[in-house]
Image (tube, rainbow, N blue to C red):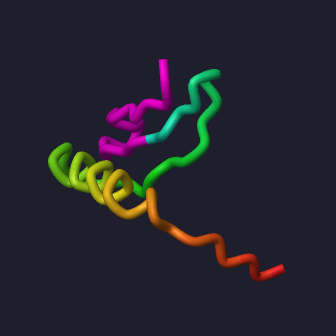
């Protein structure tokens, strides 16, 4: 099984998503969204844009 996105409602009532690696470790997490649809749009944006993202090492 590969990486997966989990969409959930937090304790404050906001929707969030997190990206989990195949080993279950959280490798990314989102801001809070007021609606589930907005959180799902965030997932779609990450899926679309992250594949070609460059690494900007600012150290």
* Rendered position, 28 above or below 10: below
* Rendered position, 43 above or below 19: below
Residue located 55% across and 48% down the image: 28
Q: Residue furthest front?
A: 52
Q: Name the spot of residue 23 as percent of width and height, x first.
A: 64, 22
Q: Is residue 34 among the parts visible in the rendering?
A: no
Q: Residue furthest right?
A: 59
Residue located 38% across and 56% down the image: 46
Q: Name the spot of residue 21 as percent of width and height, x first.
A: 58, 31
Q: Residue furthest top?
A: 1
Q: How many marks?
A: 0
Residue located 60% across and 36% down the image: 26
Task: Give the residues in magenta.
Answer: 1-17
* Rendered position, 25 above or below 57: above
Q: Name the spot of residue 2 as percent of width and height, x first.
A: 49, 25
Q: Is residue 52 among the parts visible in the rendering?
A: yes
Residue located 23% across and 46% down the image: 40
Q: Residue furthest bottom?
A: 58
* Rendered position, 42 above or below 17: below
Residue 59, located in which quarter of the rendered image? bottom right
């Amino acid at each position: 099984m590969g990486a997966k996105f989990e969409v959930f409602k937090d304790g404050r009532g906001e929707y969030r998503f997190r990206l989990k690696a195949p080993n279950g470790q959280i490798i990314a997490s989102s801001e809070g969204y007021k609606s589930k649809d907005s959180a799902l749009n965030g997932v779609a944006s990450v899926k679309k844009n992250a594949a070609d993202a460059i690494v900007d090492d600012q150290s």
